[in-house]
Image: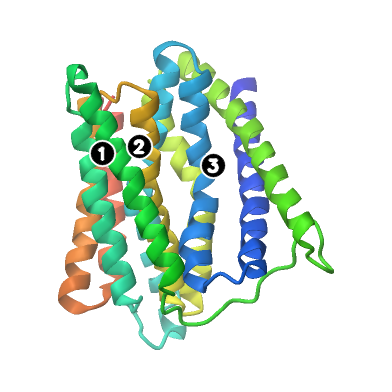
Amino acid sequence: MKSIAILLVSLGIILLAAELFVNGVEWLGKKFNLSEGAVGSVLAAVGTALPETIIPIIAIVFGQGTEGHDIGIGAILGAPLMLSTLAMFITGLAVVIFRRRRLRGLKVMADYSTMSRDLLFFMIVFAVAILAGMIPPALRSLQVGIAILMVISYVIYVYFMLNQERDLESDLEMPPCYFDRRHAALLWIIIQVMVALGIMIVGATLFVESVKVVAHTYGVPAFVLALIITPIATELPEKFNSVIWVSREKDTLALGNITGAMVFQSSLIPALGIFLTDWQLTSSALVSATLALLSAFIIFVQLRIHKHISAPILMGGGLIYTIFLVGVFRGIIT
């Protein structure tokens, strides 16, 4: 029970740090006069993705033996799976719940070019990352070359985002800076961001250690536990934000925050995994990645055909995630 309590406390610490970080990043964007697209889909998406980013790094660098490796790989692959399935399901469910107050009903009218670009980028780059996991160790230099290209691809994506503002529907009122509510001085904003990062690292370290203890206690593979628990808990900011934005019919913001995180999680983070490990993926890892790509592909196809996304299609991600869970509990995915 003590290990479970530490696990929950560590998740709380990570989420608190993420909230501090996102708030600070939003104010940094305002201070440097960055576009809404850059702040929302790059800075905010990266900010809310930092918890599940730091966890695999801590696990791989400071973890011992194969467990640290398994937790790291599980966290890396779990985030894209959760974002493309469960996060989309919750967004679709929110559309159904708030359909009476929405002029568009069950239609999600997010910016077409934004969603198309993000989903296509995700499918291509994440598929490349998975294929890199099938390359034999003898061709390690090829894996490293692919990882470098993945990093470059994300840099190019960010460059276009900084120079081509997204067509966001409206700007939400920014909450006050937590460390300087009256003046939001640049120095205090930077301090807030740095403190948030420090807290996040502490929480991630606690999480990795508690996951290993829980895995030993209950006989659950560390890879599976990290693949399920880590993304669900650390992606809460994206899901919560999307529900609020859907209720206000700000569909581009609602989906953009998720797809922006998907872009980040499909390129930069797997690239780090390739750099830090031998990146030899198991069949279970390939199955989870395939399910993530399938969910994104279904959403992408409807978007291309109808120029919008319907709530039932988004909720279909829940079915795909359920298939994943069934595979885990039946021992197919281990």
Residue 86 seen? no
Can residue 168 be seen in this snapshot? yes
Kind of residue at badge 3: Pro
- 22 relative position to 241: left or right: right
Lower sequence index among marks 1 and 2: 1
Categorize mark 1 by other alpha carbons within 10 Å: few (<14), some (14-19), many (20+): many
Given the current orientation, which residue lies at the most extreme bottom position? 103
| Secondary structure state at the residue bearing disc 2 | helix
Answer whether labels 1 and 2 touch (C-beta < 8 Å).
yes
What residue is pinned by disc 3?
51
User: Which residue is denoted by mark 2 in the rendering?
Assistant: 271
Q: Residues within 10 Å of mark 2 (few under 14, many from 20)?
A: many
Q: Amino acid at mark 2?
A: Ala
Q: Find residue 127 and report its horizontal and vertical position in percent.
A: 21, 44
111 over 1 or under it: above or below: below
| Element carrying mark 3 | helix
Q: Residue 124, position in %: x, y?
A: 21, 51
Disc 1 residue type (three-letter): Ala
> 137 or 318, which is in the foreground?
137
